[in-house]
Image (cartoon, rainbow, N blue to C red):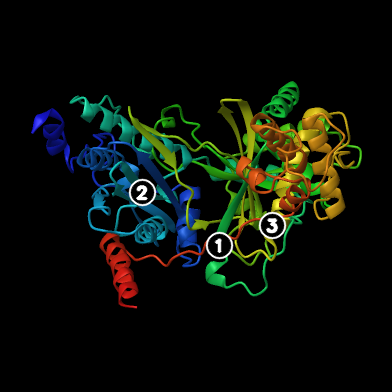
Amino acid sequence: MGKVGAWAAANRGSSSVVPDRQLEENPWYPATPMQQGLWVLDRDELLRPTQLVPSVVEFTGPVDHPLLVSAVRRALGRHPSLRARFRLDLKHRRVEYSTHGDPADAGFLDAAGEGWTDAETDRLVRALCATPFDLAAEPPARAEVIRTGPDRTLLVLTSHHIVFDGLSRTMLLEEIFTIYRAGLAGQEPRLSTPAHPASVVTTPSAEDVAAQVEEVVARLRGAPTEVRLPFERSAEAKEETSLLGTTLATALDPERTAKAVAVATEEGCTTFMLGVALLAGTLARRSDQRDFLIAFAWPGRDHPDAADVIGMFITTVVLRVSLDADTTWRELLGNARVGSMEAFMDSDVPLDAISAELNPARNALWPPLTPVLLNLDDAPHAPELAPGVTGRLRPLDPLYIKYDLALFVRIEDGAEGRRLELSLDYPADVNDHSTVSAFLSDLRRSAADLATSPEETVLEQSVNAIDLDDPAARLDLVRSIWQEVLQSDDIDDDVSFFESGGDSLLLVMLVERLSQASGRMLRTVDLFRSATVSGQADLLAAPAGQPRAAAAPGTDRLGMLDAARNRRTAEEAV
């Protein structure tokens, strides 16, 4: 069998239970205010899929599938949160949980060996990612390892948000990979003993909470709870698809990224605070609104022993940021810093209590105070399983959204330098997706303005602003950049780039400059296919792509497998 096979056989299905002798036998622990809020949201059938935290990791290279399944099972079984069951205690009027349930299992499907098509596998993955959990009866996590080709493997891992936050996802994936790598070497992995989440949660007194709520409400009162968004949703959209979303992304070039980060650093601002300034400034440039409430997720791991505990510790916090006609980008960074720091100080104040004071007339469970979210994008985009095996985090399909507009900010290190990456999640049922694309372009332009002209007022439109809806303006833009790259004023709008004196290196430069000036993320292949000034001007007018439709999930693992197979059978019969 060999040492690897023996290790896998010995560890298959095993789990280590936390030896917590200081906690009473088989207790029920009170849920945190955030967990109680998530439990309430899970009672709404429409909102249930939005409470999931799915991850789809695609590996390329040789993977030992039994070993990976074993590693996933062991990791899932180690953590109390992932064994939790929840119930409503009517006597004490609280939601509570026990961690003495069975752990989640990990399944294996040889889709390639069983003749599954890519479409069938994708349907199964969507079901694994979007099927809600029965929080009272089953573990709040599931996993499936799927072999899709000779050197292609998917790891689908889904947990409920009530026991799992973004940092937990990063930690659990890394733990799975650590166990797997140790197994390859025939060694026992070095793992710490997980603390019980109830042992690292502090609960403030009702008096302290009331005093904090009063302070937060006083700071936020007067700000509008609505935000004038850059798009309109379809009036004919169906309720069951209203939470489906799609994503657009862009990035700032390394030079301007460095300048923007430098300006932010001078003002004592983090990347998050830079994102706050860019979002508020861009929203203000597109409307007459000057005062904004923006939600964000706070890690909530204030207890010193909570740093490496898998659980749900984050809280949703709302900050306030405003500007006026004379505010410069540098001053807006200062406003963003102050608003963020004030929100950080009160991050443990229950959002429901704040919303009850500021937005008592709301007619929906979520979002309670603002339709706009801003977060740092800290997901591991390129997970490392083992030497010779590359990984990537696949985009989610379907994507469920909780906010009408969510901006994610990331500084990504690349071969050419660091880039400020901006991505927007927004509803799939908007009337015109090009309006969102235009807003993303405006965000990118705001970042460029902040980087190059931090002393200029935010609301004074950039001198580089281009109306991409104007065909003449698009032609002028493309023509001027051709002249810059080719170092020639003699440009014919209908002669190809290469016939005009360009080469492959200059084409890459053209892609970069056009992307910077237009705010559109262009590819080299796009400019190959549209090789003239007029063709590239038309390319800048192209609307954003349409989102993909979601598939209806099954109810459990076998149900998902059966549903996918039945769909295949039905299609073959047609």
In depth, the one of 424 and 347 nearer the eye is 424
| Count of numbered circles on the image | 3
Which mark is drawn over residue 543?
3
Are the residues tagged 3 and 2 within 8 Å (C-beta)? no
Left or right, 128 with reference to 380: left
Tell me residue 195's x, y (percent). Answer: 34, 33
Q: Nearer the viewer, mark 1 or mark 2?
A: 2
- How crowded pointer 2 is (Cα within 10 Å; few <14, some 14-19, many 20+) is rated as many
* Residue at point 10%, 30% (across, down): 2
Disc 3 residue type (three-letter) = Pro
Left or right, 409 with reference to 43: right
- How crowded pointer 3 is (Cα within 10 Å; few <14, some 14-19, many 20+) is rated as some
Disc 1 residue type (three-letter) = Leu
In depth, the one of 210 and 255 nearer the eye is 255
For mark 2, give the secondary structure.
strand
* Residue at point 30%, 52% (across, down): 139
> Does residue 133 appear in this view?
yes
For mark 3, give the secondary structure.
loop
Gap in Å between the C-alphas at discs 1 and 2? 22 Å
